[in-house]
Every structure is written in structure tokens, then in C-alpha cells.
Amino acid sequence: MTMSMGSLEEQLRPQLLSGLAYERLLAEIISGRLAPGQRLRLDLLAHSWAVSRTPVREALTRLSDMRFVHVSPNAGTRVADWSCVDMIERVRVIDRLIVKESLTGSRAESLSGALATRTPLTDTDCELTWYLDLAEALICREFGRLGPLIVGDHIDPLRLFVDPDTARRHGVDVDSGRPRRRALLASVRAALAQGGHDAASETLDAFGASFLEMLGAPPAASPRRGAASEPPLR
């Protein structure tokens, strides 16, 4: 049976609206425009965005699963009291996925393939968003249909958080350690140019450790994996 375009649009529209509602709410929460403890009224949100309640409800459910929204039978739906710790956990997950899972063994070529599709880091690029874009490409290559879900839950919040003004409100200075992080990314390319996939993986792991340090994670909470010492910068 052939599906008409009208029925296809009817199926896709709720998914698109749910995704847009999620993105908007997430941006409002991470930026602080929706502060922790603020009430989120389903009817008001749906009315202000001129959509039905369903996509807004789905977006709130997803944000609740991500611990950015808290749902209580008595207090209703409110912005959760999230903190920089939530971002630290996300960096740890991403670092583990792209270093330990995606860049080892027979799948080490993933990094070369992902870098081939990206332009080198320029002086005007933010090295944090460049790293997150690279992580997205690697995760989507290696985890198939799960990739976009991982990106949405872990990478998208971090992209919003590393905005200098947003990070500053949480006591994070994104300029701290920037020259070193930029040098590490350059070292990843240099290592791959020499066929050193292991060295590139270790250097990318060092970038993750530097990212965590910037966010204020205790050094002991981010042990080095697969290398006794930090790889040299090239």
C-alpha cells in the first residue's frame, strides 16, 4: 500500500514539533532564561507556541529523563536544580564513547574518516564546539540509530553550556586552558598524518580530561585510560 504525502506529513509533523519544543525548552533551561524551580505549565507553553499539548508533553518527558525537568504530583512540572556536575557527567560519557569504544581495535579508522569531513580548527573557531562536532560525527558513525539519541542527550546540552556567558554564570571560564586544548586538537591531526591512531586516541582522551578540568571536575575523577602518561604535543 502506497502512503500518500498527506499521511506522511501528518506522521512527521508531531515528531518535528516535539523535537522543536525540546530544543527550545533545552535552550531556555541551559541559558538560565528558565531558572531552576520555575514552573512549566503545559497549557501555557502549548498556547504560546501555537501547538497542541502533545509535542510539549513529549519534550517535557524527555527533559525529565535527562534530569533538566522535575515532575512532582504536588509541585507540578518545574525546571530541575541542575548544575555543572550534570555537564561533567556528559563529558565523561562522550569521552568514554569516542575514545574507548569508537577509536579502538578494528574501528580506529573512524577518527580518520570523521576528520576527513571536517575543516581544520581555525583561529576563530571554538575548540570546545569543534570537539563536540567531531564527537557527534564519530558517535553517529559508530552507533547507528542510537547516535542521534546520544547526541541529543549529551552533546546538544554541552554545546549550549559552553557559550561563554552561560558557562560564566556557572562559574566556568571557557578561556581557561584554551591554548592547550587547541594544541591537543592539532596534535590529533598530526598523529593521524603519521598513522598513529593510538597516539591520536590518547591525545583526544587528553582533550577530554582538559575539558573536565575546565568544568571543575576533580583530577582523580578522570583517570587516564590506556596510557601511563599524557601523550606529547606535536
Image (cartoon, rainbow, N blue to C red):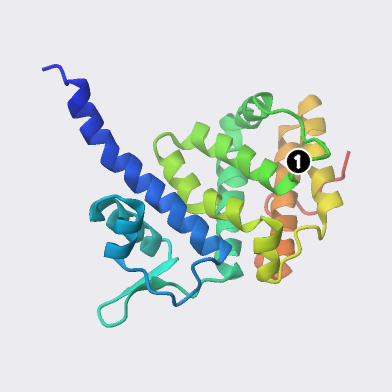
Q: Which residue is mark 1?
A: 125
Q: Position of residue 125 (x, y in %)?
A: 76, 40
Q: Residue at x 77, y 54 (%)?
A: 228
Q: Position of residue 36 (x, y in %)?
A: 49, 74
Q: Residue at x 55, y 43 (%)?
A: 101
> Horizontally, is 173 left or right of 33 in the view?
right
Q: Position of residue 54 (x, y in %)?
A: 24, 53
Residue located farthest toward the left when viewing the structure as drawn = 1
> Horizontally, is 76 left or right of 214 in the view?
left
Q: Residue at x 40, y 52 (%)?
A: 22
Name the foreground residue: 103 vs 42: 42
Locate the C terminus and report the quarter of the image it occupies.
top right
The image quarter containing residue 90 is bottom right
The image quarter containing residue 77 is bottom left
What amino acid does circle 1 point to?
Answer: Asp
Q: Position of residue 111 (x, y in %)?
A: 64, 32
Locate the N terminus and report the quarter of the image it occupies.
top left
